[in-house]
Image (cartoon, rainbow, N blue to C red):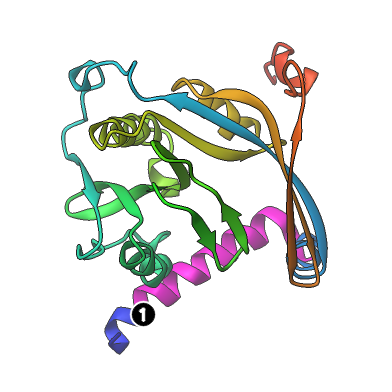
Amino acid sequence: MSESDALPERSGRLQHMAANLRKLGLRGMAAKAIRDHVFRQELSFILARRTDDLPPADATPVPDGVKLVELTRGDAVPPLSGWLAHRCADFAGLLEDGRIGMFALTDGQAIACIWASTEDFHDPNSRLFVTVPEGEAYAFGMMVDHRYRDRSVARLLAAFGLRQMNARAVIRVFNYCDIGNETSYRAQAGIGFEETGELMVETRLFGLNLQSRRRYRGSRVPPAWNRPRLRRG
């Protein structure tokens, strides 16, 4: 990578760190470092949906100026918007490993992405290992540039990704959703993902990552999510 290529990545990483600092503060950043590198336990919904009951592509038209593309091994990573730019090397590695990337582009620049794997998946950063049965795909890494999060880009891209998986004879797509992430849960429920009755339990201790599955009945959505939201002011 040339020095000029490294500058957007460095800028994107700094933007990401600055956003976390504004959101969490110094104490929150310190707590996050402990969770990331010492100990934490996470529970995630295993959500899934079939791909054979999708609305036609023209039912959710893509806005003018937005292009949806699928990339595979051998394809080049498109130019990434500022918030995503520092992930260029990671994305190139995913493509090289045979993962499938779906991107939303504006003026040739990627503003959002979602990834899928039709084979067993190992994330060296989180040390997560996902077994992917035949005829299924594991979806992960949905990211949307902050500037475009109010334009339904995520919904359009997810629907596109499901259609692409269906074209590959994938009949079921599943993913993991942090049990406390209401925004992600609702977004996925909005495109047909449902709880499977299993939780993924990840325990991280000084670099070790232990995984197990826990079955449950009914729904594990916190009751507060179903309460009416009060308007402020």
**In this figure, what is the number of numbered marks?**
1
Asked if residue 24 can be seen in this view, the reply is: yes
Q: Left or right: 196 with respect to 90? A: right
- Give 124 or 90, whichever is nearer the viewer: 124
In which quadrant is the C terminus drawn? top right
Question: Disc 1 designates what residue?
Answer: 7
Q: Is residue 20 magenta?
A: yes
Report the span colored magenta.
Answer: 7-27
Q: Left or right: 37 with respect to 102? A: right
Task: Residue 193 in the image: state x and y as whole percent.
Answer: 51, 24
Task: Residue 2 in the image: state x and y as whole percent.
Answer: 28, 87
In which quadrant is the N terminus drawn? bottom left
- At horizontal 37% and vertical 34% (from top left) the residue drawn is 158
- At horizontal 25% and vertical 62% (from top left) the residue drawn is 73
Q: Quadrant of residue 127?
A: bottom right
Task: Residue 41 in the image: state x and y as whole percent.
Answer: 80, 52
Under mark 1, the amino acid is Leu
Q: Quadrant of residue 206?
A: bottom right
